Amino acid sequence: MKYYTYQCSKESHIPNRTLIGKENNKIIPFENTIDENLLRQELHFNQAPLGIIEWDTEFRVIRWNPAAERIFGYTQSEAIGKTAVQLIVPDSAKSIVSEVWKKLLVARGGMRSTNENITKDGKIILCDWYNTPLVNESGNVIGVSSFVDDITEKLKSQKIQGALYQISEIVQTIDDIDQLYKEIHQIVSKLMKADNFYIALYDDVNEMISFPYFVDEFDSPPEPCKLGRGLTEYVLKTGQNMLVDADLDLKLRKKGLTDLIGPPTEIWLGVSLKIKNKTIGVIVVQDYKDRSTYGEEEKQLLTYVSEQIAMAINKKMNEAALKKYSEELKELNASKDKFFSILAHDLRSPFHGLQGLASILKSEIESLSMEEIKAYINEIDSATSNLFNLIENLLDWSRIQTGKYNFQQKKFSITKLAHEIELVLKYSASLKTIVIKNEFNDENLLVEGDESMIRSLLHNLLSNAIKFTQEKGKIELYYDLADEGYIEIFVHDNGVGISKYNIPKLFRIDESYSTPGTNKEKGTGLGLLICREIAEKHGSELRVESELGQGSCFSFKLSLAET
């Protein structure tokens, strides 16, 4: 191993112009050591991994090493004599850089900073700088030496890792899938501009595309639909990640591969969401005004995080499906319990009554007066009628629950149906001197639906109203055409009403809520469950407004038929 020692006089401490090499004990001329040091400096300058730039006091380049060439794209010959502002400083940072330069020229020591810079081809990069003023023997600043490192890729990697970590965190801490979508939007917004952002999911069983999360400055969230020929569907079908500017968009449409859906954009970026090579959806960002908003870098960033996003969404969807299945199973068990409860009690009780009445008539008919016989027969008629209605309800409910009800939608007169039901129940109402005010009078008022189901629904609502209305009460049957294309049908009584506490129990299979009528009429609470099911089958809800002691109003909607 070589090493060198300087030999100095005691008086001057100035090195002699000789250097002794211990390895070979030869005297080496001092000029040779200067040449070797210069060579070392030049090798360091040329081979350093960091950019090294030397500037004069006018901020002009004096020296520019190969690493600086790689970072900024300019050769040394292109850079020498030009200022930093001319070469590598974006417009947004020019004033800041000028202030930093002034501080360096007054020799206040080295300064470290992280700045945005611009390359020869116009690309914005992020660089770490360490700038040191060069001071001569007189203490004057004669220039500045800079070390520079392009940290763009490093920062991008940190951003990606941070995004992946955040996604893995939120999927463990958030239960609501809608909140998950919002959080994903926020995470993507930290990686790139995401003012117009949406997530599209594909159901391959039903061949439907839905948009569970959609934020856009012009468009409203689309309804779930069959696959069309938009850019989103193109990504779904091909599995390709697409960066589409206005020109490419036009080319795809001219080739018949896509159709324009919504306002045209300057730049559109769509990345497929995949689980084990199966595409489950697409994540999209777009800009309607600025084509430069997204490029290959943003496409790579979104691609990097798309797999984690797909896994997060898939996990939450599976959890939601499992929860729904658990709730359905719970409701199914409750339905089963309700069904057997009705069989065990409500269906059994009427038979006991019928059996008792029949036994009396059989054994004592000769001793009974005609009035007594008529009373017993009326009791039997009432019991068999209630029993028949109960069995009808049970059968309807069972068919709906098991999906075996043959839903037959057709056009029919709701006015005619309302009068038929009123006629059937008129006798029951007259026994309590109840007036039914039927405001249906236009036989050309046509609706779309399953007529048999609607008959059951209206029959149940009207018979319920009779049951819970006192003698000499009033029931109103009317409608409203307020919503375009729909009719809302109301059954309103001035009976006993329902407390706010008990209203939620009316439509719950796991809650046993059945009270006797004003004349002690029995019920199972099954009628309103059937009414709710039928309303939902027709795309409506069964609404109820009630006040204890003031009466109740039930309503549902049907689609109007074209005349």
Image: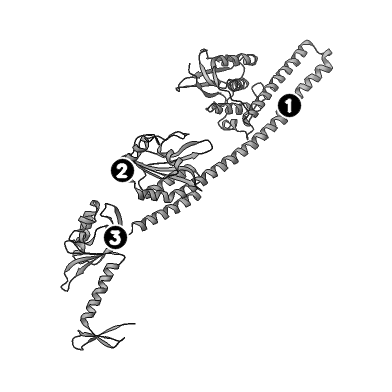
Q: Which residue is drawn at 81% across and 19% down?
A: 360
Foreground: disc 3 or disc 1: 3
Disc 3 + disc 1, Cβ < 8 Å: no
Element class at badge 1: helix
Question: Disc 2 marks which residue?
Answer: 291
Element class at badge 3: helix
Q: Residue furthest front?
A: 255
**x, y percent for residue 554:** 55, 24
Q: How far apart are marks 2 and 3 (CA)?
A: 27 Å
Sequence-wise first label, 2 or 3 = 3
Q: Which residue is more in the foreground, 515 or 252? A: 252
Question: Disc 3 marks which residue?
Answer: 70
Q: Which residue is more in the foreground, 152 or 95? A: 152
Q: Distance between the residues labelled 2 and 1?
A: 77 Å
Q: Residue at x 19, y 70 (%)?
A: 135
Q: Evaluate whether residue 511 shows in this view.
A: yes
Sequence-wise first label, 3 or 1 = 3
Question: Disc 1 marks which residue?
Answer: 349
Q: Residue furthest top?
A: 370
Three-letter code for the amino acid on which mark 3 is drawn: Arg
Q: In which quarter of the image is residue 461?
A: top right
